[in-house]
Amino acid sequence: MNNTRQLHTTTPTATTDSMLVVMDGSTRAQSVVHEILRSGRRVVLTSAISHDLVPFIDASVSGRVWAVVSDPSDPVQIESIIERAEDRIGPVVMIVDPGGLLTDVAAADRRVA
């Protein structure tokens, strides 16, 4: 009788799409980004404050994170980021806005792949 137990582990699957996270300086937003990266997805980060982006500008996530300083309340800037992300890091398939900083969520959602 074999008493060996097999462990089921999940390994991150690399994907070519990305998620846009609107950073608000909170630990919650940072935790969301860490979870997305652990899942193997790429992340587009934006914030009006560069300090919110600095923890994710790191060689260990190079090629998986694209950080852009922008005004999340300006729909034109968000639209531009979503459009440029496709060439830089992969199409944005979801937007995460923990702090509710986007002013035109419907417009942003229409731009998402």
Image (cartoon, helix red, strand yellow):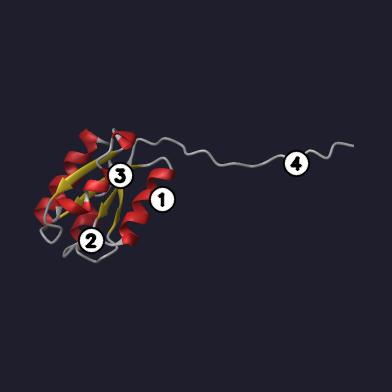
CA distance separating discs 3 and 4: 36 Å
Q: Where in the figure is residue 102, as x and y percent of width and height? A: 19, 62
| Disc 2 target residue | 24
CA distance separating discs 4 and 1: 28 Å
Q: Dot 3, how many residues are within 10 Å of its Cα: few (below 14), some (14-19), or many (20+)?
A: many
Q: Secondary structure at mark 3?
A: strand
- Report the residue at 52% width, 38% height from top: 11
Q: Secondary structure at mark 4?
A: loop
CA distance separating discs 2 and 4: 44 Å
Q: Nearer the viewer, mark 2 or mark 3?
A: 2
- Looking at the picture, which amino acid does disc 2 mark? Asp
Q: Secondary structure at mark 1?
A: helix
Return the residue nearer the eye: 90 or 51.
Answer: 51
Q: Earlier in the sequence, mark 2 or mark 3?
A: 2
Q: Earlier in the sequence, mark 1 or mark 2?
A: 2
- Looking at the picture, which amino acid does disc 1 mark? Glu
Q: Earlier in the sequence, mark 4 or mark 1?
A: 4
CA distance separating discs 1 and 2: 16 Å
Return the residue nearer the eye: 107 or 62.
Answer: 62
| Disc 1 target residue | 35
Q: Earlier in the sequence, mark 3 or mark 4?
A: 4
